[in-house]
Image: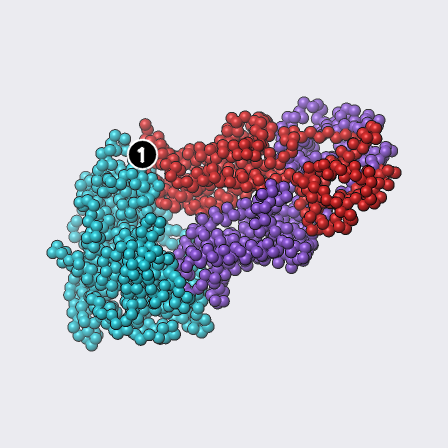
Amino acid sequence: MSPGLRRLIGLLRKEILQIWRDPSALAIAFVLPAALLLIFGYGVSLDARAVPLALVVQRPGALASSFTAGFDRSPFFRPRRYRTIQAAEQAMAAREVQGIVWLPSDFGRRAATGGNAPIGVLVNGVDANDARLIEGYVQQLWANWLTIRAEAAGGGAPLPLSVAARVRFNPAVSSRDYLVPGLIAVIMTLTGALLTALVIAREWERGTMEALMVTRVTLREILLAKLIPYFLLGMGGMAASVAIAVFLFAVPLHGSLWVLTAASALFMLAALGMGLLISGFARSQFVAGQIAIIATFLPAFILSGFVFDINSMPTAIRVITHVVAARYFVAILQSVFLAGNVWSVIVPNGLALAGMAAVFLGLARAIARKRLD
Amino acid sequence: MGGQVLALLIKELLAVLRDAKSRIVLIAPPLIQLLVFGYAATFDLNHVPVAIYDQDPSAASRDLVARFLGAPTFRLVAMLHSDRRIDALIDSRQVALVLVIDRRFTRDLLTGRPAPVQAIVDGRNSNTALLIEGYANAILTDFSLGWGAAHGQRAPPAVLDLRARYNPTLSSRWFIVPGIVALLTQVVTLLVVGLTVARERETGTFDQLLVTPMGPVAILLGKGLPGLLIGVFEASIIIAAAVWWFDVPLRGGLVPLYLGLFLFVVACTGIGLMISSLAATQQQALLGAFLFMVPSIILSGFATPIANMPGWVQDLTLLNPMRYFLVIVRGVFLEGSGVDALAGQYWPMGVMGVVTLAAAGWLFRRRVT
Amino acid sequence: MPAHTDPGRTDPVRDPKADPAAPVAAARVADAAPALRLEDVRRSFRTGARVVAAVDGITAGAARGAVTGLIGPDGAGKTTLMRLIAGLLRADAGRIAVLGIDVARDPLGVQARIGYMPQRFGLYEDLSVRENLDLYADLQGVAPDARAARYNELLHMTGLGPFTARMAGRLSGGMKQKLGLACTLVRPPELLLLDEPTVGVDPVSRRELWQIIDHLTGAAHMTVLFSTAYLDEAERCGSVLLLHEGRLLGHGPPGSFTAEMAGRSFTASASLARRRLQARLAALPGVIDAVIQGSRVRVVTATATPPDPAGLVAQAPDLTFTPVPPRFEDAFVARLRAQQTDRPPPPLPLAGEGRGEGGADRATPSPQPTPPSGRGGSGGREPNPLPDVISVRNLTRRFGAFVAVDDVSFTVARGEIFGLLGANGAGKSTTFRMLCGLLPASGGSLRVAGFDLRTAAAPARGRIGYMAQRFSLYGDLSVAQNLRFFASAYRLTGAHRRARIAWAEAEFALAPMREATARDLPLGFKQRLALACALMHAPDILFLDEPTSGVDPLARREFWHRINALAEAGVTVLVTTHFMEEAEYCDRLVIMAQGKVLAEGPPEAIKAGARTAAAPDPSMEDAFIAVIEAAAPPARAA
C-alpha cells in the first residue's frame, strides 16, 4: 500500500468513527432533511380547496339555482349564502369569505331575454395567487354551466370556442407533487453545504486541523477524506428524503432510480463542494453555519424555481439564478418525478450540475492552503 | 433599576453600532433580501414561453394568436407546422404552453359549431399550470364573446364580471412585499435578541453582569429593549421601501400598523430571550433561532395560504405570532383595516408576548439563580 | 554549553554583530545543518484598524539534540513563531531554515521531518487513545509491522498503557498532553515543536513531561523547541529565546541570563508585615523588583550592591538582606525595566496608606474599622478576632455522576488574600463560581459576607467585585464606555458616579486610552481595565479568577501591588490560580485536586510540609507535587 493511500484510509477511518460517535453529522444528514421535508411538505401547499365563498342570489329562480348548484358540488368551494351584497362584503372584509359571487336581482330576466346577464365575481386580491386560482375555478364552473345549459336546451355551442386543456405530467395539478421534489433540492443544498462546512470548521476550532497540517498528509487527501464519507452520508439523506416523498407524500416517481441517483450524486458533489469552499473562509462552526444558511438555503429557496417561476423574474435576477446549483437539480427532480426520464431536461441540467460541482470542488482545492493564513 | 436598564440598553446598542461589521450585518442582508424577495418571489406570470401550432391560418386564427401575443404574459418561442415537436418542446421545458388551433377552426366558427382549440400545459409546476390555464381561458373566453357578438350569434345567458378587491391588478408583489416586513422583522429581532446573551456567555462578560447588583428582570429588560428598538427601526425602513420603492399602497393608518408591529416585536423578543436563556453558545442560539424561524415562516401564510394546510397544521399555526402580524400588515397596507377590524389579530400576539417574556424570565431565573 | 556572553545585551534586537549560530556551533553534532535558523523573521496581523507585529524581526537559531525554549508572556509571538517554523504561516519577511530546508520554499519537506504539537494537543477527542495513535501512524507513514513495538515504547514512556481504549476526550489534561506528544512521536521526528504544552497542566504532569523531553533529547538525540509562558521552565532548557511583544529580548543558555544578574538578588526580612515591607522595598532607589516570597521579600537591584536600607530604618530597624542565587525571571524583569523607560508604569498606591481617592471614598458602602495592621502578614495565622467573611462548609457540586467539588470546607477572614490553587479540572473554578453565586451548590453551605450570593438581594451583591478569567470586558465598547457601563451596573449615580469613573481613569492610568476600543488594548491594559471595572463600586470583597494568566511579569507585579494595597485597606480577596508563584502572595490558600482540598494553610506552612533533606527549601511547586503525591501515590514508577 502506498503511503498516500494509507494516509487517506487512515483519515477515512477516523472520519467514519467520528460520524459514528458524534450524532451531529447524522442529525444533519438525516434528521434535518426529514424534519424540513415534513414541515414544508405539510406546510407548503398552493392548492386552494374548500375556499369559503359568499353566494348572493338576490332573486332565487331556476336559472340561478342551476348556476349555484355547481358551487355546492365543487370541491374547490365552500359556499355560504348571504341575502344582500352588503352582508357579503362585510363578510369579505372580516376575512370570513375569500370571494363573492353575486347574481343581481335582474339576473333571471336578463338571462332569459338578451343573454349576457352579468354575474358579479369579486375576489379578495390580497393574496394575488389565491385570487387568480379562485377566478380560474369560477370561470371553469361558469363554462361547465354553459355547456350543461346548452346541452339541456338541445345542442348548439354555448360559446364559439371549445377549449380542450390538457395538462401533461401532473394531471391532478397537485402542488405537493411538484413542490416536494423541489424541496428535496432546496433541503439537500443546505444539508450538503452544512455537512462539509461544519465538520471542517470543527477541526479548526478544536485545533486538530493544525496538527493534521504538520504531517505528511497532502491537501488532496484531506479534502478527499472529507468528501467521500460526507458524500455517502448525504446520499443516504437524499435516499431518505426520496423515500419520504414517495411513501409518505405519495409523489409519483416516473423516471428511473438510476437517473435520480446519478443526478443526485452530481448535485451532492456540487453542494459538498460549496461546503468545502465555505470552510475555506470560515474557521468557526458559527460563521460556517451562518454562511451556509445565507449562501445556500435562501438562494435555493427563492431562485431555484422550486416555487417561484424563474421565467417570470426580472432579467437581472434570472441571470443570477444560473449560478444556483439547486436550479438545475430542481429541474431534473421535477422531471424525473413527474415526467420520467426526459433526456432533453436531464442532459443539459446534468451537465450544468457537473460543471458546478467541478467549479466548486476546483475552487475549494484552489483556495485551500496547507497553512493557517 | 431604571439606570441599570438604561445603561445595559445603551451598552447593547453601542455594541451593535460601534462595530462597522455588525452595522453592515444589520443593514445589508435585510435590504438585499428585501430586493431579492421583492423582485424574485413572485407568482405573477410573465414571459411564459409558448408555442403555437396554427393548423388553420386564417383571419380568425390570426386574431386569436394576436390576442395571446399581445399580452405580456406570453412570449412566443416557436410557430409549429406539425405536431411532431409538441411533446418534445414541453418535455424539455422550452415552452410551458402549446396552443393548437384545429384545422376546422374557421369553418366551425362560421357554422356555429364549437371551434376546437387545444391548450397543452406543462403540469410539472402545478401552480404555473393552473395560472397559465386561467390566463389562456380568459383570452379564449374574451375572444369567444367578441366573436359571438360580432357575428350575431346568440349570447350566452350570463357572463362573468371578474373584479379583485384591494389588489385590482392581482400583483403578487403587493402580497409579498408587506409580508417581507413581517419576515425580516422577525429575523432581525430574533437574531439580535437570541444571540446577545449567548455572546456574553462566550466572552465571559455574562458572569461579570450576574455578579453586579443587577437583577434578572433588569438584565432581561436591558437585553430585550435593544431588540425591540432595532426591530421596529428595521421594520420602518422596510415599510418605507415598500411604499416608496415598490409602490405598494399603504391604505390604512400607521396606528394599527405600528400597534401590530409593536406587539409582534414584543412576541419575537420574548421568543428570542427564551432562546437566549437556553443557549450556552452563539452556535446553539443560532441553531435555536433557525429551528424556530423556518417552521414559523413556512407556517405563517407568508408564501402559501394557511387555509391550504392540513387541519392539524392549521391549528399549529395559531401558535405562530407571524401569522397574525401578516394579516395585520397586509390588512393595513392593502385593505386599509383599522384597529377594530384587526382586534382578533392583536390579542393573540399580546398573549404570546406576555407568555414568552414570562417564560424567558422564568428560564432565565432558573439558570441564573 | 560554554559560558556565553549574551550578544543582545546592549541592544537585543538590532545588534548586527549578534551571531545567532554561536550557541549552535558549540552544540553542533555530526549533522550538517543547524536544527533551526531564523533570519530577521517578521510577521504581522491585522486586527480591525490596527496592524500588530506578532513577530518583529527575530534572528536566532537552535542547536541539535537540545531543548530550546521559546519563552515569553502571552502576545510575545511564541505561537506565531512556532507556526512560521512549522510552515503553517508564511513570513512577511526574513528567512527560516529548518534542518537546512527553507520553509517558504518546501513546507512539505519540512513537515515530513518535524513533529508539531499545537496548543490543544491536536487530539481527536471522540477517538480512543489507540485510534489517535493509529491515525497519526497512518499519516506519518509508519509501517504496520513496526507499529506494535513503537506503540509499546510510547505507551510505556507516557504511562498511557492502561488507557488505550479510553476516548481522548475523557483523559485528564496531563494525559491528553502526553497522548498529544505520543502522537507526534509515532514516527520519531528530527525536530519536535511543542507549543505551550504545559499550559493548564498540573505540576506533576509538567514534571513528567520534562522527564520525557529529557529522555528524548538525551537518549534519542532529538531536537526540541518548547514554548512556554512559565519563566521557571527556562532553566530546564539548553538554550532560551526570550520573547516580548514580538521582539527577541535575549538569546542564549539560561545560565547566561542569570549570570548577568549575579550578586543582584537578595531576600529581605524584617519584623514589618511582609506586604508593607514589599511596598517600601519596591519604592527604594536602585531596587528594580520586589516580590513577596513566603514571609520574606525577594529583592532585585539595578547593580550588584545590596539596596541601601537607610530610608527604612525607622519602620524596619531589623531589616537584613541575604544574597540569593538569581533566577531567570530576574533577568527578564531587569530587561523589561530597562526597556520601559519610555513607558512609565502608572502611579501605584502605597500599601497600607489607603487607596488614594478610592480609599477616602470608601466610607459610603461599608464604614467598618480598618483591621489591626500586621494581620495576615507574617505567614502564620493568628487567632482571628473578626468574623469570617467567607465561610464554606462541606461544599459539594455534582454534574451528573461527576463530582466536580467534593466536600470542601474553608473560611476566609476580612482583609485576607485567600488562594484556590490547582490545575485545570481540579474544581477550583467550580468552587469559585459557586461562591460568586453563578452556580448552585449540590450540597453543603456557603456564606459570603453572611449571604448566599445566589439568593442574595442586590445590595449584598453590591459589596463584591468580580474579575472574570481572560479579563472579560465588552470588546466592542471603548474604555470609557466600559467604565460608564459598570458604574451604572453597580448603581452609582450622579456626582458619585462621575467621581468614581474619574478615580478609575486616574488610578489605572486609563485616561490616554479612554477612546480606544477595549478589544484592541494590549493585555496589560485589559487587565487594568478589568480590575478598574471590578473596583468601580469600592467593594469589600474581591473575587479574582486567574487574574494574571498570560500577562508579563511587570504587569503581574503591578497587579499584585494593587491587590496588596487593597488587602491592607481591609478588602477580602479570593483568588484562583494555577500559577504556583502566585500562591506566595496569598495569606492562606487551599490546594485542590479532583474536587478535594488536599492541603490548607499559609504558603510557608504548606512549603514546610514538603521540606526534606534533599530539598531544604522547596518551592511552591515542589510542595504542590508533594501534596498531590501524598494524597494519591503515583500509579507507576517515574
Shade representing chain C: cyan
Colour red belongs to chain? A
Is B192 placed above or below A120 here? below
B318 left or right of B206?
Answer: right
**Where does label 1 land, which residue?**
C138
Q: Quadrant of residue A227?
A: top left
Residue at point 54%, 50% (across, down)? B187
Residue at point 25%, 61% (across, down)? C589
Shade representing chain B: purple
Residue at point 52%, 53% (across, down)? B271
Residue at point 18%, 65% (across, down)? C267
Q: Quadrant of residue A129?
A: top right
Name the spot of residue A71 as percent of width and height, x first.
73, 38
Name the spot of residue B28 as percent of width and height, x first.
54, 51
Image quarter (top left, top right, bottom left or bottom right) of the N terminus of chain A = top left
> Please, which colouring scheme is shown?
by chain
C636 left or right of A249?
Answer: left
Out of A360 and A61, give the one closest to the viewer. A61
Name the spot of residue C559 as percent of width and height, x first.
31, 64
Out of C624 and B30, give the one closest to the viewer. C624
Element under label 1? helix
C149 left or right of B40?
Answer: left
Out of B255 and C385, give the one closest to the viewer. C385
The answer to whether residue B141 is visible is no
